[in-house]
Image (cartoon, rainbow, N blue to C red):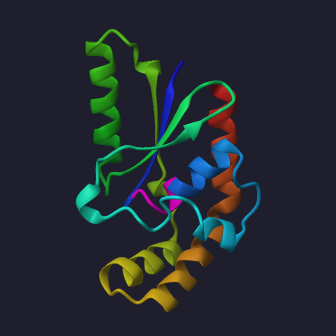
Amino acid sequence: MSNVIYSCYYGSYLAAVAAALHLGHLKEFDREKIECLAYFGKVEVDRLGWLYFIGEDEKGRKIYIMGAKKVGKVVERALKGVARIYNMGEEAVVFVDLLPYGNFLFSAGCFLLERLKLKGVGDFFLMMGIKKSFGKLRVLVENIKQSG
């Protein structure tokens, strides 16, 4: 049985949404529900690389989120390498790098929120970006759920 780690730049936006989709806590784009997710917007930059347990799915897989900036592929190789070292098999970890699921609106929102600390306008762009990529994100998560 594998564990699933959803990762994005900060680990608290797309990763939190993907984990909520995976666990059935979110079915459609809903701004209010997204803003209430446990770690949404709450993972600090100094906690990049930390794993946050979100829940367990119906197949018993543990679901985590993590921030990895732009090194998701490196983190994935490292995790699979560690799994091999401990004879767990590479399939023990499903690492999902969500960086490709961001878009200009999402990136602009993150920049405004995280770098410039402009909450109102940052939230607006961030949510518009999430809304724009929500369908693709949902399909990805469904594929991951079916594959395990």
66 displayed left or right of 25: left
- Majority secondary structure in the magenta region: loop
Q: Residue at x 31, y 15 (%)?
A: 84
87 displayed left or right of 123: left
Residue 8 at what x, y percent from top left?
A: 43, 55
Q: Residue at x 62, y 66 (%)?
A: 34
Q: Residue at x 38, y 13 (%)?
A: 88
Q: Is residue 12 above or below residue 7?
A: below
Is residue 5 part of the magenta span, yes or no?
Answer: no
Figure quadrant of the C terminus: top right
Figure quadrant of the N terminus: top right
Q: Residue furthest left?
A: 46
Q: Residue at x 59, y 75 (%)?
A: 127
Q: Is residue 31 above or below residue 135?
A: below
Residue 136 at what x, y percent from top left?
A: 66, 55
Q: Nearer the viewer, residue 119 or 112?
A: 119
Give the quarter of the image for residue 48. bottom left
Q: Nearer the viewer, residue 18 or 107?
A: 18
Which residues fall within the magenta stretch? 11-15
Give the quarter of the image for residue 45. bottom left
24 displayed left or right of 82: right
Residue 2 at what x, y percent from top left?
A: 51, 23
Q: Residue furthest right?
A: 28
Q: Is residue 64 above or below residue 122?
A: above
